Image: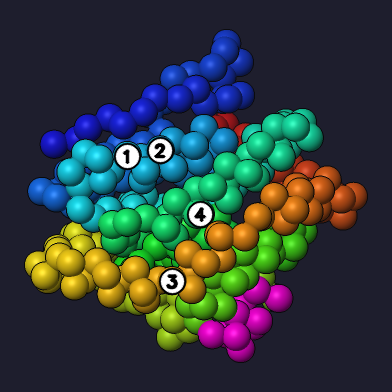
Amino acid sequence: MAVVFRTALDEGICAFGPIIILVLLTFDHGPVREVRLNRPPVNALSHELIVALRQAVQNAPSDGIRALVLSGSAGRFSGGLDVPLLLTYDHTRMATLWRDFYALLQTLACSPIPIAAAITGHAPAGGTVLSIFCDWRVAADGDFKMGLNEVQVGLPLPPIIFAGLRRLVGAKQAERLAVAGLLISPKEALAAGLADELAPANDVIDRAVHWCQSLLALPKEAMTSTRRIARGDLTAYFEQDFEPEVQRVSAGWWSPETQSVLHAIAAKLGKRTAASSS
């Protein structure tokens, strides 16, 4: 049964005012909860979605949930940050967004219950970032792209994200993927270690649920304790005060080079939207 987790206002999508949308849907598979991004058309990350997702992950254990699956819509896991929307934010709101995004990554990394990412399709930039801080990544096999293309869109890759990438794929692969801002196919992601398993698009969520269930079938205390040890290096990243890093990342958003590239991207996306609606 689907359970609506949170409603939020989506901004700037209607000339007559804001439209209320459900940014997350949840589906409980016994003790495994699927949290599905639900922000059409590409599940781009707004401030509201970031905050709602963090709340959903935080609240799951108190609901009796023992594992989570983070999923997206068919063909679209997440398009990353909603650049056109975020370009309307002022300095204060962008700084708040970055703090909340770091807090979301911390919540994923430090979750007391396992989290599998069901990468249901395209997952550039922020879509891949979310998966990096989960326990396991099952990607749809097909004509999809994932990777950290921040450099290509004028954004230096934040250090905490590079650290998570390096932990996952190793130093050499992390340098190759991050410095060039590469977007790669699911098969290439599997070979690089950015994905742990491939599955047919229609089976991705089921495979993620099955992976969670396989962990939950193990002796609980032994699995939980060992998982805590195994992820200790990841959780340690967030034991430091990352406010100085957040301030640097936020300031970088406003650099002339970054703003120039981002405005060009927003204009290009606007033309695509206009063409598709005509």
Q: Give the range drawn in magenta.
A: 170-179
- Looking at the rendered image, the quarter that the N terminus falls into is top left
Q: Position of residue 140 (x, y in %)?
A: 33, 66
Can the viewer see residue 46?
yes
Q: Mark 3 points at which residue?
A: 232
Which of discs 3 and 2 lies nearer the camera? The answer is 3
Q: Which of marks 3 and 4 is nearer the N terminus?
A: 4
Q: Which of marks 2 and 4 is nearer the N terminus?
A: 2
Residue at 64% x, 83% y is: 176
In-image side of 72 versus 207 (left or right): right
Residue at 48% x, 19% y is: 19
Q: Which mark is residue 59?
A: 1
Q: Position of residue 221 (x, y in %)?
A: 18, 67
- Label 3 environment density (alpha carbons within 10 Å; few <14, some 14–19, many ≥20): few
Three-letter code, disc 3 = Gly
Count of marks placed on residues: 4
Q: Name the residue under label 2.
A: 55
- Looking at the rendered image, the quarter that the C terminus falls into is top right
What is the CA distance from the residue labelled 3 to the residue labelled 1? 22 Å
Query: Would residue 173 be counted in the magenta stretch?
Result: yes
Q: Position of residue 109 (x, y in %)?
A: 44, 60
Q: Mark 4 points at which residue?
A: 105
What is the CA distance from the residue labelled 4 to the residue labelled 1? 15 Å
In-image side of 278 versus 37 (left or right): right
Q: Do the residues labelled 3 and 2 touch (CB within 8 Å)?
A: no
Can the viewer see residue 139?
no
What is the CA distance from the residue labelled 3 to the residue labelled 4? 15 Å
Q: Are marks 2 and 1 in contact (CB under 8 Å)?
A: yes
Q: Where is residue 91 in the image (x, y as percent from the top left)?
A: 78, 35
> In terms of secondary structure, what is the magenta stretch mainly?
helix
Q: Earlier in the sequence, mark 3 or mark 1?
A: 1
What is the CA distance from the residue labelled 2 to the residue labelled 4? 12 Å
